[in-house]
Image (tube, grey):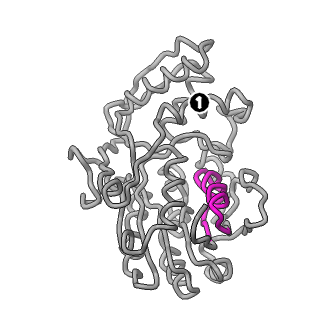
């Protein structure tokens, strides 16, 4: 339990990460307001007397201001997430991911919020052959999604002040099971393929991709609410754990699925070419040294959790269901 229970607004709180984060915040004793477009509904959230769920659009400045009033912390997860979803409607994505960001931060500060945690992305680094990509590494985004996530960072830091603590987290690719599941992320994609097709298709394979278990990144966001201002104010932290090539990730998934579901063995692995060149080896030494934060769960744990969700019947129609794939949901919603 937190020694200092807060009232926390979580933007995008009904999404993949939010549906794991919100129960952790409630378990820590915090009161939570979720502000979300509800493109995926809110069925992944629990019912709780300390939880308020608000359907809202970040671009509606007045509605956001009303929702954040009375909150002392914001965890900003909301965005049009992943490159295909962004490219589907670039104007929409820019308006949600970037244009409304500064008005939102300004409103939060004006309404008395004292801590603002921004979930950026480690994909802002693009391609790097550096053995360790630290927080000081230049940002070389390859897509507009990465670019606009990165451009929000200096905006937030400009608002840093003694009464408004800002912190930026650059998470690695998140993996593992969530009640609002995504099956368009590398480890999750491979697990879905292995369980249902008994075959994995690798695009490229040599690209290095850092990953982090969904429970670990959510634990970090909860921890950031309690840490002293001095440790985190105006700081940027990489948050990754295991750096593997895409081909290595496929072999990990193959091994775990064959262990968890021996009836699926043997699972075959096929390789084809890829135009997705993002590759980087993220260093998370700063967050370990400064905050003592070290992830506890592995990629194997994430695959195991997803296998058990399949076995429990929690992921019906996982190859065809639109709800598991962000680009399909954004397209179907037809939002402007």
Q: Nearer the viewer, residue 27 or 81?
A: 27
The answer to which quarter of the image holds residue 237 is bottom left
Q: State whether residue 298 is above or below residue 331.
A: above
Highlighted magenta segment, given as a residue range: 8-31
Viewport quadrant of the C terminus: bottom right
25 falls in the magenta region: yes
Q: Nearer the viewer, residue 85 or 285?
A: 285
Q: Secondary structure at mark 1?
A: helix
Q: Which residue is mark 1?
A: 192
Viewport quadrant of the N terminus: bottom right
Relative to 46, is 103 on the left or the right?
Answer: left
Q: Position of residue 53 (x, y in %)?
A: 73, 66
Residue drawn at the location 21% of the way across and 44% of the way down: 131
Residue drawn at the location 62% of the way across and 78% of the way down: 71
Relative to 212, is 4 on the left or the right?
Answer: right
The answer to which quarter of the image holds residue 14 is bottom right
Q: Position of residue 171 (x, y in %)?
A: 43, 53
Residue drawn at the location 54% of the way across and 88% of the way down: 110
């Amino acid at each position: 339990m937190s020694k200092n229970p807060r009232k926390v607004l979580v933007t995008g709180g009904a999404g993949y990460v939010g549906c794991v984060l919100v129960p952790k915040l409630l378990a820590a004793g915090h009161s939570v307001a979720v502000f979300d477009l509800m493109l995926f509904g809110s069925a992944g959230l629990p019912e709780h007397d300390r939880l308020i769920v608000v359907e809202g659009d970040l671009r509606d400045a007045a509605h956001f201001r009303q929702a954040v009033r009375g909150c002392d912390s914001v965890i900003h997860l909301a965005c049009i997430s992943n490159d295909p979803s962004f490219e589907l409607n670039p104007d929409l994505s820019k308006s949600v991911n970037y244009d409304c960001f500064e008005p939102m931060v300004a409103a939060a500060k004006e309404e008395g919020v004292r801590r603002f945690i921004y979930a950026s992305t480690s994909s802002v680094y693009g391609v790097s052959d550096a053995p360790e990509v630290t927080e000081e590494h230049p940002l070389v985004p390859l897509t507009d999604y990465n670019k606009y996530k990165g451009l929000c960072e200096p905006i937030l830091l400009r608002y840093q002040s003694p009464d408004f603590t800002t912190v930026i987290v650059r998470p690695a690719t998140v993996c593992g099971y969530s009640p609002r599941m995504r099956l368009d992320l590398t480890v999750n994609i491979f697990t879905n393929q292995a369980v249902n097709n008994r075959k994995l298709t690798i695009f490229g394979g040599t690209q290095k991709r850092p990953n982090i278990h969904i429970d670990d990144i959510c634990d970090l966001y909860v921890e950031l609410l309690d840490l002293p201002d001095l440790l985190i104010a105006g700081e940027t932290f990489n948050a990754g754990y295991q750096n593997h090539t895409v081909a290595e990730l496929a072999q990990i998934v193959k091994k775990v699925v064959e262990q968890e579901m021996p009836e699926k063995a043997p699972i075959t692995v096929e390789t084809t070419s890829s135009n997705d060149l993002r590759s980087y080896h993220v260093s998370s030494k700063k967050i370990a040294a400064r905050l003592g934060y070290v992830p506890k769960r592995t990629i194997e744990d994430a695959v195991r959790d997803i296998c058990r969700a399949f076995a429990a019947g929690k992921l019906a129609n996982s190859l065809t269901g639109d709800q598991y794939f962000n680009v399909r949901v954004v397209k179907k919603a037809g939002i402007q």
